[in-house]
Image (cartoon, grey):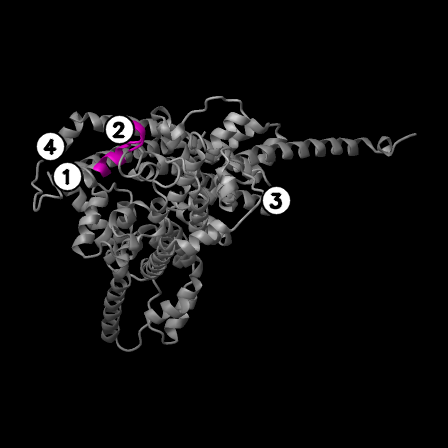
Amino acid sequence: MRGVAGNLSGAPERTPSGGVWQAARRGWRSRWGMAMLGYLFILPAMALYLTFSAYPLVRGVMIAFSDYRFLIPNHQPFNGINNFVEMWNDRVFWESFRRSLHYTVIYTPLNVGLGLLIALLISKIRHPLESAVYRVIAYLPVVLPIAVALLLWKQLLHPQFGYINYFLREYMGIARPPAWLADPYWVVPTMAVAAVWKHVGQNILLFLIGLYNINTEYYEAAAIDGAGQWRQFTDITLPLLRPTFTIVLVLTAGVLGTAEESLILFGVTQAGPENAGMLVGRYAYEIAFFVGERRWGYAAAINLAMGLVSMMLAAIVFRLARGERME
Amino acid sequence: MTTRADALPRPGSRNLLVKLWERRRGIFLRVVLWSFLALFLLPFIWALSASLKTRQELYVALPSLITWEPTLANYTYVLRRMPAFITQFTNSSIVTTGAVVLQVAVTSLAGYAFARLRFPGRDLIFYSLILLNFVPRAGGLMVQYELMSFLGLRNNLLGLILAFAASVPIPIFIMRQTFLNLPSAFEDAALIDGCNRFQAFLLVMLPMATGGMLVVGLFEFIRVWGEYLFTLTMIDYTNLYTLGIGIAMNFMGMALEDGEFTSYGAEAAAHLLTSAPVLLVFILFQRMFIRGMMEGLKL
């Protein structure tokens, strides 16, 4: 991507009148004043950021290495890597981790693949108003409140009364469609697909911006040289979309599964049938807020480990996407 | 009888064929596209039809997307008979307005400073802001919970406003970019005419940066209006619920689990009323969203 170039200098220095000393003093004063002014301007934003974002970051890493139990007063002794050792031996953790991987393996390819496919289709529409309508429709789910989106899908996916199964029974001739969110086998795929529905609009728009930025002359030249649609796609579109791919992949890379989705779909008492919707995020959230003494230290350790794994994945993806040759 | 088509010169007829082929491809393209878009729209259509149905129609075991006797009864039920909904709507409005105004204000100031003023450590601070954004948050909601309790901001709408407004790095980036793209000549003129820096910022530069402010404000509006997990963790009292979490609670246990689907219609109406502000704002300003993302891509 383009670097943050541009005018890094402030306003040009005003030419001071008067003697050299006076000029020097004024220069010093204005520079000092300018510095103070600068700090004053960023103060409100920085105060908010330091309090609500930077401090929790540091504190979070600290409690990940302690046996912090929230409901026991003043109980947060440092315990080294004990939390991580416990995590390594925690069967429930590994189960939820496996579910998160399952979720990711469905979510990420669908999110990127469908995003690209639909963006390609929309980019073929020449009429500006028509393509604007399609863009709006594709992005609608992204702006929808997450609870509304998931609860509407929950209604649609209801095994008996939902429209999806009605459609499958009546029009597709499937006598016994899956019970979706009521069947442990289908819970994770269903959650992943619902999340794709919610978020794919973001990728569609990112890919569209990438596609619109490709100079049409390349295609014209290729067409004159006799390149077909597929050749044009593999030899022009894909290479020139590389920066967009980098961004999309870095944004979606990671082991996914926040607490949010299963909390909305299944409520707080249970993570779906047989806890089949218990992804890592939900597991950490339950430890932190629902279970026993509320073991914040352990929950923070899980969050930290998952965050680092995701960050490493993003870094690998970034290296792969950047490292390969353009040809 | 000779037709006119026979009289047409050859190249012309070939053009006609090409045109036909092109048109067929266009139709094929639209069929594929619309089958995807139908999936995007399905929950919206479903909600709309369910919200317009009468109780009798909802009792029919076979769901259908078409309703023959549309009624607004579900909407009047939600708006008149569900005081919780009105409370939540008000709370959401307060939190969203507060967060948007505060965030736009502080990030405009900061963005201006990072773009135009010179002070020691400026670029270091700016790039740390951006980089820290990618570091995982181990503390998650726990540290936030602790912090908000300590500040007395749990179960407090002001707490939500401050915390939501505090996600400043990307907005600062957008505002900085906006100010960098403005010509400095106006500002210099204002300074020479005797404005001080703050006046130059407020009276000359800020009015020209409304585009960037709008982008920042829109994304914040969308994000805050439907926020779920943070609000759920910070708010215990139902009278402080926002729509983001309230919508999941109002009909909980009441709707489908019991096979009781009379509340279906009211629930659908509540969903649509909850989404209406974000959908409206998005459709009105959809160009701005694309612009905002293009700005963000420069990162």
Tag 1: amino acid: Gly
Q: What residue lies at 55% left-to-right and 45% top-to-bottom?
A: A133
Of residue B157 and residue B236, the one placed in the foreground of this image is B236
Q: Residues within 10 Å of mark 1 (few under 14, many from 20)?
A: many
- Asked if badges 1 and 3 are on one and the same chain, I answer yes
- Asked if badges 2 and 3 are on one and the same chain, I answer yes
Tag 4: amino acid: Asn
Q: Nearer the viewer, mark 1 or mark 3?
A: 1
Residue B96 screen position, x and y as percent: 36, 56
Tag 2: amino acid: Phe
Residue B5 screen position, x and y as percent: 84, 32
Helix, strand or loop under label 4: helix
Name the disc covering residue A297, or none.
1
User: In terms of sequence position, does the residue under pointer 4 or pointer 2 come before the other?
Assistant: 4
- Asked if badges 3 and 4 are on one and the same chain, I answer yes
Name the residue beneath numbered marker 4.
Answer: A82
Name the residue beneath numbered marker 2.
Answer: A97
